[in-house]
Image (cartoon, rainbow, N blue to C red):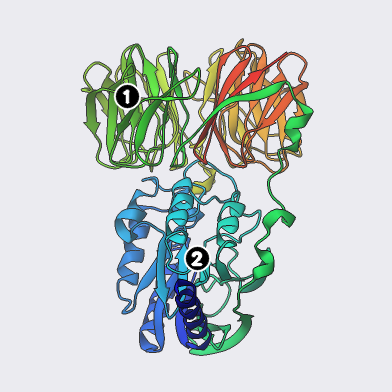
Amino acid sequence: MKTTTFFVISLFIGIAAFSQTFKFAFLSDTHIGVKHADEDLRYTVSDINADTSLKFIIITGDITELGTDEEMLLAKNILSKLKKPLYIQTGNHDGNWSPTGGRIFNQVFGAGRFAFQYDGYLFIGTNSGPFMHHKAPGQVPREDILWMDSVLNNQIDKNIPVVYTNHYPQDSSQRNWFEAMDRLKKKNVQLMLVGHGHLNTKFIFEGIPGIMGRSNLRAIDSASGYNVVTFRNGTATFEERKPLLHTSHQWAEVELYQHDFIRDTAKYTRPSYVINSSFPNIKAVWQFEDKFDIGAGMATYKNLLIATNTGGAIFALDAKDGKRNWSFQTGGKIYSTPCVSNHYVVVASTDSNVYCLDAKNGKFIWKYKLMKPAVASPTISNNVVYIGSSDGHFRALYLANGKVKWDFNEVKDFVMTQPLVYAGKIFFGSWGNEFYSINASTGKLSWKWIDTSNNRMFSPAGCRPVATKGKVFIIAPDQYMTAFDASTGKVLWRTKMPNVRVRESMGLSADSLLIFVKTTDGRLSCISTTANEMQSVYSINLQLGYDICGTSIVESHETVYVPSSTGVLNAVDKQTGKLMWKHKVCHSNICSVTPISANKVIVSTVDGKITCLQLGK
């Protein structure tokens, strides 16, 4: 009897889904902040409101250009005029350069993921990164993957037809496309809607029809545009609509049916860990997996590893086995790397507070309220905490009680990196194309360097500076490496490496003679700190492919650890410049490397994993 009832329900859902006719608007890449973007979106909103046949609106990410409060609030103001239900999700532009770490999106639009049923179809959409400084192909957050499980596993009927939406194409454009794909293939997934590429394009994603929607921007065209999607009699048709010109034309049609043949995922490409077999002496002795992404580095305190996550937690693991020792919850996502001094651990949260905890047990000691969320990391020196923020200030706080020692309020745009303390000065960059030197005792500006490109994306804000022998060094997305006189700010040299490009990933050798920089074509180059110009001591091709992971390079016990955006940690002999070993811990961006002995290193990755690697005999 139960089997018959289930069959009747399934049959009814299948017939309903096949016979229903409905329309909805499909937008993507509105990029509020770009010239004419707000005007283009207003035309589209007005056009959608005039069409009474449209039942709802889906927007697949990149709502804004830089994820700022101003852009997000403007987008909200325009989209609030819609008279139909709106389902909206994030794209890389909404989070990667956001001064609030994406918090403003959540405050304005909600979770950035959705699941709803309409006329027998389940529509499900997830967020996508990268978030903050983790420059790499996109990624569905760990928390969204687990949320997908809760949605897909709680449906009354597993055969309900599913439409999945994401900002990225569901292929290697997104680091963990396979995690979403493998879950969807266990269900009746019939169509995928994506953005990111700005052009109307048809795809097949592992046997599933996919449609990329055009950007709403007019670009070089005469008018903005979006898609009107019609579900009718087992097909989905796509019409490009240009509001200002009041024109439409159908450009795609997709059959909607259950793709039983794709449920076996074994024949499709998945991340390979075969590289680990080439270096069998490297073993993962333990791995911790969180329920959230990890968006920052780690600190150590005795036998503890102190980390943070995008669920707002500051937590400690036992370095011996990866077991959680203590946890403290903040009110916002965290992209700030903890800093430890004595028994104090300090970290900032996007809930606009700087927290100080007891590193031994996670007990609260004090917090300092900022004017805006913080994504920057602190540095502690001589019992003073130095930290930037997103409110135009850079502050020095007394470690013991969180009281302000001084407050420098002339920062252009926001700070996201960890400052360097060197020779009595504080060095850091901002997303306002500026690099600062501040007197550590007084908070007075010593000197400031301005990148004159006027391109915010070229700002020296993503790398942690290094300094030695009276010089301070930075690299930036403009592909230049720059050496300053630490005292005066005079540019000693500013050079592009021939035929290769540098980004934000760099580090200083233990003997201060070399600066390690990673190039975007996957090379490790070692630059002399004593030469009067950029001088490469040696270079090794690590064969990483195109790689813009901005995580710092670390040397310990004569081994140089080079992170990557594919979850591969590379170990290079500092003296010879030869590759010692590689090990792939996951298929995600490495966000910190923490050596804890000559043969043991801890690696954290954006997908919520912390892995202990050990070099065996």
Horizontal side of residue 86 vs 286, given as left or right: left
Numbered circle sitting on residue 94: none
Q: Circle 2 sits on which residue? A: 29
Q: Inspect this view and state whether residue 484 appears.
A: yes
Q: CA distance from mark 1 to mark 2?
A: 42 Å
Quadrant housing the N terminus: bottom left
Q: Circle 1 sits on which residue? A: 444
- Spot occupied by residue 6 in the image (x, y as percentages of width and height): 47, 74
- Circle nearer the viewer, 1 or 2: 2
In the foreground, 97 or 423: 97
Label 2: state its secondary structure: loop
Horizontal side of residue 300 vs 264, given as left or right: left
Using the rendered view, name the quadrant where residue 355 is placed: top left
In the foreground, 235 or 384: 235
Going 56% across and 44% down the picture, which residue do you hit?
135
Going 45% across and 86% down the picture, which residue do you hit?
22
- Spot occupied by residue 416 in the image (x, y as percentages of width and height): 42, 37
- Spot occupied by residue 173 in the image (x, y as percentages of width and height): 63, 55
Crowding at mark 2 (Cα within 10 Å: few <14, some 14-19, many 20+): many
